[in-house]
Image: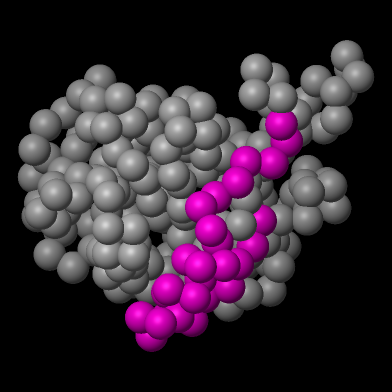
Amino acid sequence: MKIALQFAMPEELRALPGAEDLAPMKTISGVPLFEIAPGIPACVGGVSKVNAAMAAEILCLRFGMDMILNAGVAGCATDLPTGSLVVASEFIQHDVDTTAVGDPIGLVSTVNRVAFPTWEPARCTALLQSLGHSAVTGRVATGDWFAVKGDRARWIADTFHPTLVEMEGGAIAQVCLRNGVKFAAVKSVSDHLFSDNQTEEYFDFGYALKELGKVVLPFALALQKEEA
């Protein structure tokens, strides 16, 4: 199975052991692509849904991937400790709203669905645990908004009941669905939406990156072996 890693920020890729000074093998449409391990490409797609979707499409069409593994840090809408690993069970897009024409909140047109599935999340969680890493499974909400404490964050939590809120995964999930490519995601908790110290948490997410960096490549290799 051909598997690729997709990150949003350079810091997330650089958290992988040995990747600190890794140079891109090529850049396509402004998206830097790396060989993170023999036969495993990785990209830094950028923050937000359009950037994420464009990078995912490159991996699907130009590289012919069988699976994309999205890895990164994310804000937590519950009380999981910083650095906790969450395997996404599904993604929703909290900033899609065509309720004015009778659609349910979060419905994405063209594909006409609210929730975007990931590949066998329970199996992925068990696989991470078999590698010696604690992990839980949870829904993730995506949108082009850096989630901070306030009325909108509370509305997202009450409407969609996510474990995490971030800015890319839902777009990657949609691209993978339309291309018939498997999609998995593992996130590390960097900050907490309803904490009075959220800003300080986010700008000090070294621990979350460290926990993420320890698991991503072994997890990808294990997935590849499982599906060989």
Q: Position of residue 63 (x, y in %)?
A: 23, 32
Examine the rendering and report whether any part of residue 203 can be seen.
yes
Q: Position of residue 166 (x, y in %)?
A: 56, 48
Q: Position of residue 208 (x, y in %)?
A: 42, 69
Q: Residue furthest top?
A: 101
Which one is nearer the viewer's eye here, 226 or 205?
226
Residue name at image x 85 percent, y 23 percent: 103
Q: Position of 35 compared to 140: left or right?
A: left
Q: Position of 76 compared to 101: left or right?
A: left
Q: How many marks?
A: 0
128 shown above or below 57: below
Whether residue 117 is in magenta: the answer is: yes
Whether residue 95 is in magenta: the answer is: no
Residue name at image x 19 percent, y 38 percent: 33
Residue name at image x 53 percent, y 58 percent: 120
5 shown above or below 193: above
Residue 133 sits in which quadrant?
bottom left
Q: Position of residue 34 (x, y in %)?
A: 16, 44
Q: The C terminus lies in which quarter of the figure?
A: bottom left
Which one is nearer the viewer's eye here, 65 or 162?
65
Q: Position of 70 compared to 43: left or right?
A: right
49 shown above or below 37: above
Residue name at image x 46 percent, y 60 percent: 186
Which one is nearer the viewer's eye here, 86 or 155?
86
Residue 75 sits in which quadrant?
bottom right
Q: How is the image coloured?
A: one colour
Q: Residue furthest bottom?
A: 132
Q: Which residues are magenta?
A: 113-139
Examine the rendering and report whether any part of residue 146 can be seen.
no
